Amino acid sequence: MRITRRLFNAALVGALTLGLSPLLTTASPAQAAEKVLRVGYQKYGTLVLLKGRGTLEAKLAPLGWSVQWTEFPGGPQLLEALNVGAIDFGSTGEAPPIFAQAAGAPLVYVAHEPPAPKGEAILVPKDSPLRSVADLKGKTVVLNKGSNVHYLLVKALEEAGLAYGDVKVSFLPPADGRAAFEQGSADAWAIWDPFQAAAEVAVEARTLRNGEGIVSNHQFYLGAKPFVDANGAAIDTLISAIGEIDEWTRANPGEAAAKLAPSVGIPADILTRALERQSFGVKPLDGSVIAEQQRIADTFHALGLIPAPIKIADAVRKAGS
């Protein structure tokens, strides 16, 4: 079989994610002619519910589309897949698209969810002597590099009168971060839901600071710009399906938690706690959201976390496209 660039990229990303099988299969002539929307999702969130209910497939079928779903451990990995052409669309928090845009990824912001500042936090063990963010000076904080909580840590330190360099930052994905946290090799863990809720219940982790008053914790829906520009009808159908799932979840949090539990591997009661901190109501980005995202990008550039300044507005989907 001749391995095309697209197949190679899919195999590469498969190797980088959590044991995903490389997408190196031989397509039949009918499959080759089919239009496929490749959606990347994380272990928790609206897209998982959309996948489970099958409503997107039903909406896209009359337009001649099928859907291919791929799971990723975090936003940075998902956007790397988008960058190499292995997926067309996905959802992440605020920070991952900034790092991806700075690295030249051809992404476009399609829509966002309202703020959910309680859905991420800096946690410490229940018996930790640390009582405030100021107490983190000289301590080790573990987090997923380039994720929303990266910015939460920056703003929490700023509020406490500390510089980013006043703490030791260790970069680990959520599963490894929790292990480091529980084993005592990190003093604090910056993490988001549902991992945040799971730690609160399982090990009685204590919140040192959540995002209230300092960060918004938006969720963004992003697409590969060439795909979005060429397939506006499919993207609009996808956003409509997300809106319907949003409304259903808002009205049925307990049922939503029960449906999420098997795929996430977290009990429904813990997921209910997380969903109560989540926001719903997908909509296009407005000027205030773009400006807020720009402030995050400027902050990361000033700290040397991204190599050059970027302009968020350049990567926002234009109305009617």
Image: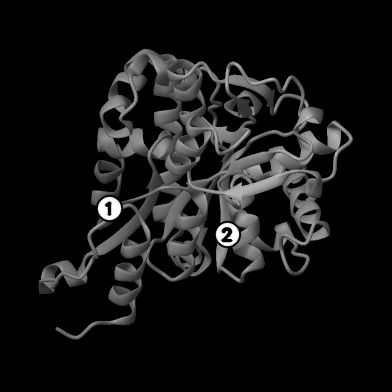
Report how many numbered discs are placed on residues in the image: 2
**Could you tell me residue 285's position as x and y percent?**
65, 45
Mark 2 highlights which residue?
108
Front one among 274 and 123: 123
Callout 2 amino acid? Val
Among the 4 quarters of the image, the one containing residue 198? top left
Residue placed at 39% from the left, 54% from the top?
Answer: 234
Is 244 displayed left or right of 167 in the figure?
left
Quarter of the image for the N terminus: give it: bottom left
Q: Position of residue 250 (x, y in %)?
A: 46, 19
Left or right: 91, with 111 as reference point: left
Against 155, is 234 above or below? below
Circle 2 Cα neighbour tier, 10 Å, few/some/many (<14 / 14–19 / ≥20): many
Task: Kindly state the secondary structure of the residue where label 1 is placed.
Answer: strand
Residue 316 at least partly seen: no
Label 1 or label 2, whichever comes before in sequence order: 1
- The residue where tag 1 is placed is 67
Q: Nearer the viewer, residue 249 or 70?
A: 70
x and y percentages locating residue 228 in the rendered image: 48, 61
Dot 1 alpha-carbon crowd within 10 angstroms: few under 14, some 14 to 19, many 20 or more:
some
Indicate the amino acid at tag 1: Val
Whether the residues at callouts 1 and 2 have beta carbons within 8 Å, the answer is no
Residue 105 vs residue 261: left or right? right
In the picture, residue 266 is in which quadrant? top left
Q: Is residue 132 left or right of residue 281?
A: right
- The residue lying at 81 percent from left, 44 percent from top is 166
Label 2, secondary structure: give it: strand
